[in-house]
Image (spheres, grey):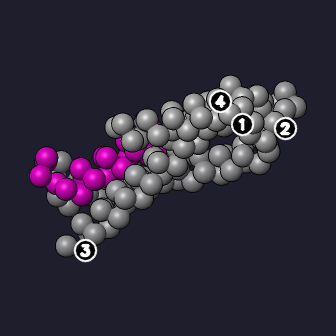
Amino acid sequence: MVFFYGTPLVLGGIGTTLSWKIGGVGNILAAFAILAGLLFNLLVLLFDVAAKAAQVGGPSSQNVRLKLAKQLQANVTYALLTALTAAGILGVASGMGMEQVNRWLSGILLVLLAHFTLTLLMIMRRIRSAFLNSLV
């Protein structure tokens, strides 16, 4: 938990202290919009995977596939929330004609970007676990 939340906060604090300013707001917004769309698709796919896992192994607490699907669903939903928050901030900044955001908003965006990246890495790890579990 310290690494997952602490690292982005430290990075955002460093960026704010050193007056880093994020530029290319429109490009970053486009990237977040694409990733959010892909995460929505993954969420729909996970619904199908969970339904199949519940059919095969039942809804019991012993069903490892169903447990992994539920954990993945929670992680993907959280990553989607993070992406939509960052996209909302970037969308407002882009709508105001900002090509570069101030240091305080850059600090917040750095926290969200780093946290989103770590969340995606966790999702990849869980997908790998689910894949390896399905081979057994």
Relative height, residue 15 to residue 37 (above, below): above
Residues under labels 3 and 1: Cα distance? 46 Å
Residues under labels 2 and 3: Cα distance? 48 Å
User: From the viewer's perspective, is 29 left or right of 78?
Assistant: right
Q: Are the residues flagged by discs 4 and 1 in contact, CB closer than 8 Å? A: yes
Count neighbours of disc 4 (C-alpha within 10 A) and say few if under 14, some if 14 to 19, many if 20 or more.
some
Residues under labels 4 and 1: Cα distance? 6 Å
Q: Which residue is mark 2?
A: 99
Of mark 3 and mark 4, the one earlier in the sequence is 4
Of mark 2 and mark 4, the one earlier in the sequence is 4
Can residue 123 be seen in this snapshot?
yes
- The front one of 23 and 91 is 23
Q: Which residue is mark 4?
A: 16
Of mark 2 and mark 1, the one earlier in the sequence is 1
Can residue 83 be seen in this snapshot?
no
Residue extent of the magenta highlight: 60-85
Please identify the dominant SS of the magenta region.
helix
Where is residue 94 shown, x and y percent of the image? Answer: 81, 34
Q: Which residue is mark 3?
A: 135
- Residue shown at the point (60%, 51%) measured from the top left: 35
- Residue shown at the point (30%, 62%) measured from the top left: 130
Q: Secondary structure at mark 2?
A: loop
Label disc, if present, on residue 49 of the rendered structure: none
Q: Which residue is mark 1?
A: 20
User: Of tags 2 and 1, which is closer to the observer?
Assistant: 1
Q: Secondary structure at mark 3?
A: helix
Q: Secondary structure at mark 4?
A: helix
- The front one of 62 and 120 is 120
Relative height, residue 38 to residue 134 (above, below): above
